[in-house]
Amino acid sequence: MIPLINLKRQFTTIEKEIVTAVNDVIQSGNYILGPRVSELEKKAAQRLGTADAITLGNGTDALALTLEAFGIGSGDEVITSPFTFFATAEAISRAGAVPVFADVTPDFFTIDPEEVAKKITSRTKAILPVHLFGQPADMDEINAIAKEHDLIVIEDACQAFGAFYKGMPVGSLADAGCFSFFPTKNLGTLGDGGMVTTSDEQIAAKIRKLRAHGSEQKYYHDMIGYNSRLDEIHAAILLICLQHIEDWNNQRKKLANHYNDAFSDLKTLLPPRTKPDRTHIYHLYCLKTENRDQAVDFLQERRISTGIYYPCCLHLQSAYKDLGYKHGDFPVAEQLSDQLFAIPMHPFLGEDEQQIIISAVKEMDEER
């Protein structure tokens, strides 16, 4: 079976470096918020073009703590996409606010700025666009809407470390950016991890306080906080991965270009599209078809793994039934949830494996 992603193959290439780094951490006796965390935060901020980076326990906490740091809470509304992983809306709810969904664009899958503008009310406090599958959202339009209505913009960049929008790295395009270091992410560790980037000194300080039980001085607590700290072992691993992320992302783009060229003349499946003013780093490579179940079964029979992202839009999740949304409220997102599926994409996908996938997809397209 050709897997959707091969983490073992990826981490094996840097196994010796990881083992040495982990041993160094063990020998140091310093395991929480130590020098490796500080070094990672400094290097990430430099790479992403922000004044600060704050590491956290996971990407969900990155979103939730950022919302709280901006004072978003009970009674507030935050506009976001219904077509993304649950954590995006979950973080809004955890902050005590209400997620308000706006439909996405049919070709690029990111939130539609025109739909965002329609959702603004007197209770709206922020917009939370998602750089889905590794492609940046329409940030100029979103920021313009936010400026007009005095709203905060927080990037959900959890799937997009290394992507660029008009030459600027994601994470530097708004008031703050949130990242996940979950193992499957382009920049991931051997466990959970997250990060917030911002150039707002006060917000950075507040997130640092929130991540450590609302404390700046040990045993003295200024607010009710969280326990959400990236440990030294994960920081050490991420420092190693950070040295390779550009090569890994370039390999993803190379593989995606090969897919795109091979699939340019398909009749029943549509490859992903990318806007020319941004860099897609292909966290996932998704095809669109009206016969997804048949396509998935066809590839499964040929020992090719697939994934469905996402089978149920957020507005239709049981957790949000009290918001009163129904089928048909966001037709583009709902269509994508019925038609998109991912095929194998990772930096260590072999040429022979990719050719098997391409041949199978073409064979499937010709038979239908």
Image (tube, helix red, strand yellow):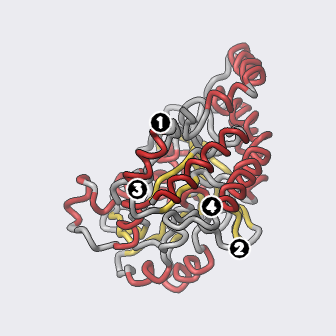
Q: Earlier in the sequence, mark 4 or mark 1?
A: 1
Give how far across and how far down residue 218 sits, in percent: 54, 32
Camera-side residue of 15 and 39:
15
Give how far across and how far down residue 285 sits, in percent: 58, 54
Camera-side residue of 175 and 143:
143
Q: Earlier in the sequence, mark 1 or mark 2?
A: 1
Q: Earlier in the sequence, mark 2 or mark 3?
A: 2
Q: Earlier in the sequence, mark 2 or mark 4?
A: 4
Q: CA distance from mark 4 to mark 1?
A: 46 Å
Camera-near label (3 vs 1) is 3
Q: Which residue is mark 3?
A: 292
Q: Which residue is mark 2?
A: 276
Bin the neighbour count of mark 2 within 10 Å (Cα to Cα): few under 14, some 14-19, many 20 and up: few
Q: Which residue is drawn at the image coordinates 66% and 56% (left, top)? A: 259
Looking at the rendered structure, the kind of residue marked 3 is Arg
Q: Which residue is drawn at the image coordinates 74% and 66% (left, top)? A: 168
Determine if residue 347 is in view. yes
Looking at the rendered structure, the kind of residue marked 1 is Asn
Q: Are marks 2 and 3 in contact (CB under 8 Å)?
A: no
Q: Are marks 1 and 2 in contact (CB under 8 Å)?
A: no
Q: Secondary structure at mark 1?
A: loop
Q: Secondary structure at mark 4?
A: loop
User: In the image, is 192 to the left or to the right of 118?
Assistant: right
Quick one: quadrant of the N terminus? top right
Looking at the rendered structure, the kind of residue marked 4 is Phe
Camera-side residue of 301 and 137:
301
Q: Which residue of the protein is positioned furthest toward the front in this rendering?
A: 367
**Rendered image: mark on residue 263:** 4
Q: CA distance from mark 3 to mark 1?
A: 41 Å
Q: Which residue is drawn at the image coordinates 70% and 62% (left, top)? A: 261
Q: CA distance from mark 1 to mark 2?
A: 41 Å
